[in-house]
Amino acid sequence: MPAAGRRWLTVLYDPVIAATMRERRFRRLVAQRVLAARPRRVVDVGCGTGTLALELVRRAPTLQLTGVDADPDILRRARAKLAPAGAPVELVHGRAEALPLEDGTVDCVVSSLLLHHLAPEGKALALAEMRRVLRPEGRLVIADWGRPQDPLMRIAFLTVQLLDGFAGTQPHVAGELPHIVVRAGFTVLGIEPLRTGLGTLELLVARPSAPAVVGDPAPDASEQARG
């Protein structure tokens, strides 16, 4: 998927994110959460131009890292960015809704600024795929738009909605992302909001849930995060 759904914006993606998203801070926080459990194999779903991948391999040079993206042009840019650093990252063309990976082979799945591009059914499919490829003890790390913290953050996020569309972004405005993750079969371990120039970003960490027991009450994302 091109930047904001428009190929002519691809060339502007990196400078715009750097200027508006407190990118160094949020990429650093995401990398810390990905590497906290010392994973051996990590998959970056919707890897984009490879900025997060570069941050990860700089911090963990022996990491087995695969980046997956559906946009061939974005992957070419990622290869050009990663090659000078000698970063050993495998870049694969594929969609989040049908990951080209085997079941239960990944220690951590990370996804940043991807899910808000997808319609509700696409979010569910992508998260189901992420759960499928994770090992039972694996971790999911998501950085994406969340409920605005205040009116200023809500106004700022209108820019994103106008570019990316309201169908995919509205559940994020409503604070539904943690609940969508829970419905996909995860237990939320923590949620951290981060103010940016374009709205409130949520950093969410989760793990695959144990199989449900008949008669158990439905899980609540906010209670999970507090626990």
Image (cartoon, grey):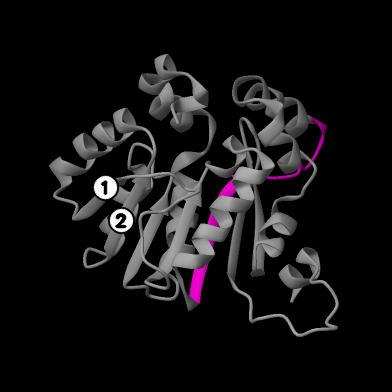
What residue is pinned by disc 2?
Answer: 66
Q: Which amino acid does label 2 sit on?
A: Thr
Q: What SS does tag 2 mark? A: strand
Residue 91, numbered label: 1
- Identify the residue at horizontal 81%, vertical 68% (top origin): 220
Q: Would you identify the image quadrant in which residue 209 lies? A: bottom right
Expressed as whole percent of the image width and height from the top left, the position of residue 41 reads 33, 68
Q: In this view, does 93 lie above or below 184?
A: above
Question: Which comes before the other along the chain, label 1 or label 2?
Answer: 2
Q: Is residue 146 left or right of 40 when viewed as pictured?
A: right
Residue 49 screen position, x and y as percent: 34, 36
Evaluate if marks 1 and 2 touch, with contact meaning CB atoms under 8 Å apart.
Answer: yes
Query: Which image quarter is the N terminus in?
Result: top left
- Amino acid of disc 1: Leu
Residue span colored magenta: 137-151
**Residue neighbourhood size for the residue with mark 1, other residues' Cα within 10 Å, grouped as few (<14), some (14–19), many (≥20):** many
Q: In this view, does 40 lie to the left or right of 89?
A: right
Q: Residue at x 31, y 73 (%)?
A: 40
Q: Where is residue 2 in the image (x, y as percent from the top left)?
A: 43, 27
